Image (cartoon, rainbow, N blue to C red):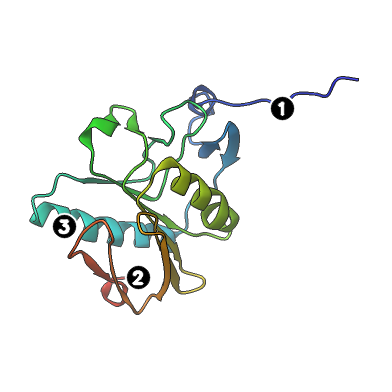
């Protein structure tokens, strides 16, 4: 007896979803996303402003994009994610659809529905795709987990801490001063 084959989805399937449907694609599997909460969006806004202001004031070449922003992680059509914040330093990865390849720095804000995805699935996927740095910001646990994949380090912080970004020498985000 033949086994039924599992359907492998592509980015084309993501684009064919009904308007307003939020989903990501990892290794050909679709993961639907709930709408973000107000606190989630507040954190995204505050961090986006801090990172954007830093890049602008230092005349940097990196760009920061908030979700929804398409990231084709492995430059294929079976891995499509929308990180809460993506920092891309190689302009050659940017096109009209989004980012083709791994961003340098990804920040995800954890929600109850995304906990497993952010802490496990995306952690593995981002590391293997070549993301340099990954921050998991968990408001329910008052915790920020910083993964610096370039040096193989992980460190936990609280919302009262200042955190230095690994991809920059002098970008320090003081979470206690963010308006969240």
Between label 1 and label 2, give the one nearer the viewer.
Answer: 1
| Disc sitting over residue 53 in the figure | 3
Distance of label 1 from label 2 (alpha carbons): 43 Å
Badge 1 crowding class, 10 Å Cα cut-off, few under 14, some 14 to 19, many 20 or more, is few
Q: Point out the residue furthest to the front here.
A: 151
- State the residue at coordinates (52%, 23%): 16
Badge 2 crowding class, 10 Å Cα cut-off, few under 14, some 14 to 19, many 20 or more, is some
Residue 114 visible to the viewer: no
- SS at mark 3 in the image: helix
Q: From what the image shows, is residue 29 above or below residue 120?
A: above
Q: Position of residue 14 (x, y in %)?
A: 51, 29
Choose between 170 and 176: the one closer to the eye.
170
In the rendered image, the quadrant that contains the C terminus is bottom left
Residue 91 visible to the viewer: yes
Q: Position of residue 112 (x, y in %)?
A: 57, 60
Q: Position of residue 26 (x, y in %)?
A: 54, 37
> Of label 1 and label 2, which has the lower sequence position?
1
- State the residue at coordinates (46%, 74%): 142
- State the residue at coordinates (33%, 33%): 98
> Of label 3 and label 1, which has the lower sequence position?
1
Q: Residue under circle 1?
A: 6
Q: From what the image shows, is residue 91 above or below residue 105?
A: above
Q: Residue under circle 2?
A: 180
Between label 3 and label 1, give the one nearer the viewer.
Answer: 1
Q: From what the image shows, is residue 32 above or below residue 43?
A: above
Distance of label 2 from label 3 (alpha carbons): 18 Å
Between label 2 and label 3, give the one nearer the viewer.
Answer: 3
- SS at mark 2 in the image: loop
Q: Point out the residue furthest to the right here.
A: 1
Q: Position of residue 162 (x, y in %)?
A: 29, 75
In the rendered image, the quadrant that contains the N terminus is top right
Q: Choose top left, top right, bottom left or bottom right for residue 44.
A: bottom left
């Amino acid at each position: 007896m033949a086994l039924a084959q599992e359907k492998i989805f592509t980015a084309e399937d993501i684009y064919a979803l009904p308007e307003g449907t939020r989903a990501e694609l990892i290794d050909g599997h679709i993961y639907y996303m709930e709408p973000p909460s107000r606190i989630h969006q507040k954190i995204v806004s505050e961090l986006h402003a801090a990172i954007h202001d830093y890049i602008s004031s230092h005349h940097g070449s990196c760009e920061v994009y908030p979700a929804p922003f398409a990231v084709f992680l492995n430059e294929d059509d079976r891995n499509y994610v929308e990180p809460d914040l993506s920092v891309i330093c190689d302009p050659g990865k940017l096109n009209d659809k989004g980012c083709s390849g791994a961003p340098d720095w990804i920040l995800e804000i954890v929600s109850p529905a995304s906990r497993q995805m952010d802490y496990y699935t995306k952690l593995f996927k981002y590391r293997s795709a070549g993301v340099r740095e990954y921050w998991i910001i968990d408001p329910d646990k008052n915790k920020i987990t910083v993964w610096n994949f370039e040096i193989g380090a992980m460190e936990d912080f609280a919302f009262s801490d200042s955190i230095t970004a690994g991809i920059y020498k002098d970008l320090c985000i003081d979470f206690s001063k963010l308006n969240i």
